Image (tube, rainbow, N blue to C red):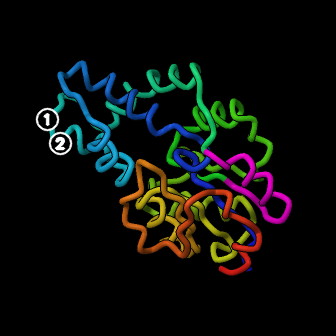
Amino acid sequence: MIRGVVFDLDGVVADTERLQWAAYRHVLAAFGIDVGIDEYRREWIATGFGPEYACRTYRLPITPDELRARKAPVYQAMLRDGVSACAGAGEALVRLRATHRIALATNTARVEVDFILARLGVADVFHATVAREDYARPKPAPDAYLAAAAALGLPPDACAVVEDTERGVRAGAAAGMPVIAVPNELTFDNDFTLATRRLDHLDALTAELLATL
């Protein structure tokens, strides 16, 4: 029986992927590089290792972690200018909190997680939030989702994952959790073979659906 639901942040709860893209574009422009949205979709969103890809492909004179560090303040400034929830996210969180324990598991840094959830007014909906500092290996490794299940006090197989990317689905499946894929315009062509269900919209994410997993 599913007793907990663990949500991804970017592209599931918060509509932040285009902001992330814009922040990386800003930083990479200093090196004469312009990353288009399709390249960003393939190498950043789908895999989670965009900085590694950029440093290798464009032979940047900085490391992937340095690229992430340069992007962070640019992205945070963009968040302060405005961030919105994904369609149906707020309603899904409130709806499922009435019947399930709710957690967040993300590769995003804690300072950004806290800001986004506060700005969206959903911070108090979550029983637990797991940010990048809270586990060892990023998605597609299962660490984030295993940490979220532990934070909820539930075994992994009692938790369902809600994800929008291939790497997120792989992470949830590796953690031994049923995964519900909810693709968006930037992830529609990811490989969701490992997902237990695929939904077109978060409006379809209900307690009744979870009972069938």
Q: Is residue 146 above or below residue 83?
A: below
Q: Which residue does the numbered mark 2 point to in the structure image?
A: 56
Q: Which residue is mark 1?
A: 59
x and y, in percent, of residue 211 in the image: 73, 78
Magenta residue span: 87-103
Where on the picture, by quarter, is residue 153?
A: bottom right
Give the crowd class for mark 1: few <14, some 14-19, many >=20 residues within 10 Å.
few
Q: Which element carries disc 1, helix, strand or loop? A: loop
Residue 36 lies in magenta, yes or no?
no
Q: CA distance from mark 2 to mark 1?
A: 5 Å
Q: Position of residue 72 (x, y in %)?
A: 45, 28
Question: In the rendered view of the protein, which quadrant contains the N terminus?
Answer: bottom right
Residue depicted at 60% across the width and 64% down the height: 161
Q: Is residue 99 left or right of residue 48?
A: right
Q: Are marks 2 and 1 in contact (CB under 8 Å)?
A: yes
142 is higher (above) or lower (below) than 113: below
Residue 199: x, y in percent?
56, 65
**Residue 1 position (above or below residue 111):** below
Residue 144 vs residue 18, the one in the foreground: 18
10 Å crowding of disc 2: few (<14), some (14-19), many (20+): few
Mark sitting on residue 159: none
Find out whether residue 90 is within the magenta segment: yes
Identify the amino acid type marked 2: Arg
- Residue at figure coordinates x 54%, y 59% from the top left: 182
| Residue type at numbered disc 1 | Arg
For image coordinates 34% across by 36% down, the residue present is 65
Q: Position of residue 32 (x, y in %)?
A: 17, 22
Q: Residue lying furthest right in this view?
A: 98
Q: Nearer the viewer, residue 191 or 106?
A: 191
